Every structure is written in C-alpha cells, then in structure tokens.
Image (tube, helix red, strand yellow):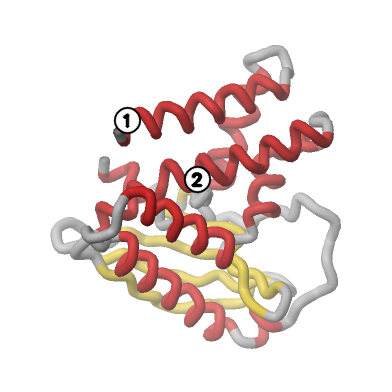
Amino acid sequence: MKNNRRTLLTSAAIALMAGFGAAIVPAIAPQPAYAQATQAPQAAAGFVQSLGDKAIATLADPKISDDQSKEIFRQLLNENFDVNTIGRFVLGRYWNSANEAQRKEYMELFERMIVEVYAERFSQYAGESFKVAGAQPAGERDAVVSSQVLRPSGPPVNVAWRVRSKDGGFKIVDVVVENVSMSQTQRSEFASVIENNGGRFQALLDALRQRIQTVQAHAQ
C-alpha cells in the first residue's frame, strides 16, 4: 500500500499519470518556446505548492463521496496536467500504429484509468502535508519543482514535478517519485502489453478497459 501511495502524487493522474524525474520527451511536434517557466521557476513552484495543498486537503476530506472525489480529481487532472502530451509520450511509437478511432479511445481510457486508480488513493492522504523545496529551470520551456510529502509516521516521500509553461499558465508534463519515472514505467508497461500480444494495439485497449473494471469492482 505504501508503494501504491507513492506512485500517486499525484498521475497519474496519471499521472499519474505517471514518475517524473527524467526529462519527458515531447511526443508531439515542437511548440513555440515558452519562457515563463525558465525565467520564473518560483512561479512554477508556487503552482505546484498550490496544487498539492488543494489536492490533499480536498481529496482527503472524509465527507466527500467516492463519486465526488473522482469528479474533483478529474477536474484537477485536466486543469493542471497536460494529459494529451503525457498520454502520447507513454504510448511512444505505437501512437503511429493506431488509427484515429483507436487513438481517441486510448486517450479516453487513459484518462479514465488515471481517475479511477488515483482518486481513491488520494483519500488515504489524510494527516499528510505537502511542501515544495525548490525549483530550477529545465530547458527552454520547463522547470523542475522538488517537493516532499510529509507523513505523520515514516520518512517523507520525495516528488519532482516537470512543469511546462503553456497557454499563459502551467501544465505538469512529468512527475518523479523517489527517482522513479512514472511516465517511463508506464511507457514500458504499455509497450510490453502490445508486444506480448503480437503487436496488436487493440490488446492495450482491452487491458486498459479491464484495469478500469477491476478498480471499479474493488471499490464497490
């Protein structure tokens, strides 16, 4: 359970939707360079601190229902994470082997998986606090924000966030938990599913649907 909780903060959503210490490789065509994150990493740090405080305080509230928790998590995910970039990176080269309908279904299932898996885990963060330790520029568009989840018992959990300046604000594109890249880990897992099923992309969609159903059944 402790390991499961570490994989959350928070990815994912993910995402995560999945660990974000290694630099994430953009899975889409390069966008115009943004300077906000590199010129003002402290602004990125403030963004992460605010998000962490809000997520723990809101989702760990015992008064909210499971359905409310999922909806809150979905909102936080879509507002603060670049789900499309993360989802495409995780899929890697297999994005090009999927047709348009499969890509659409994959992105829908990817988001649902993050929400179903991690919204429930956030409910276990009661009594914990979140502290940003610092931030530094990372390339032309990004900043890496270092943080810790402080627990009433046990050592703190180190989490690094790769934040990208986008559309006048910030989006998280990677999260690193105890030096383990969740995005890289998920990318390897997805590739294994496809490769172990004769290169069939449909096998990944089936696996994602099954995982979502399993999580839902366990929650009932």
Displayed quadrant of residue 43: bottom right
Residue type, mark 1 in image: His
Q: Residues within 10 Å of mark 1 (few under 14, many from 20)?
A: few
Which quadrant would the N terminus be assigned to in this image?
top left
Q: Is residue 159 placed above or below 185 in the rendered structure? A: below
Q: In front here: 179 or 213?
A: 213
Q: In whole angstroms, how far apart are the C-alphas of marks 2 and 1?
A: 15 Å
What residue is pinned by disc 1?
218
Q: In front here: 76 or 185?
A: 76
Q: Position of residue 129 (x, y in %)?
A: 27, 69
Q: In front here: 167 or 142?
A: 167
Q: Residues within 10 Å of mark 2 (few under 14, many from 20)?
A: many
Is 123 on the left or on the right of 170, as rendered?
left
Q: Which element type, helix, strand or loop, lies under badge 1?
A: helix
Q: Residue furthest top?
A: 198
Q: Residue sitting at 70 percent across and 80 percent down? A: 168
Q: Position of residue 58 (x, y in %)?
A: 33, 66
Q: Residue sitting at 61 percent across and 68 percent down? A: 171
Q: Position of residue 172 (x, y in %)?
A: 58, 64
What count of labels does the image hold? 2
- Residue 61 is tagged as none
Residue type, mark 2 in image: Ile
Is 60 on the left or on the right of 213, as rendered?
left
- Residue 114 is tagged as 2
Q: Is residue 136 placed above or below 39 in the rendered structure? A: above
Q: Is residue 178 visible?
A: no
Is 4 on the left or on the right of 75, as rendered?
left
Q: Residue sitting at 60 percent across and 73 percent down? A: 143
Q: Is residue 144 visible?
A: yes
Q: Closer to the observer: label 2 or label 1?
A: 1
Q: In front here: 217 or 185?
A: 217
Q: Which element type, helix, strand or loop, lies under badge 2?
A: helix
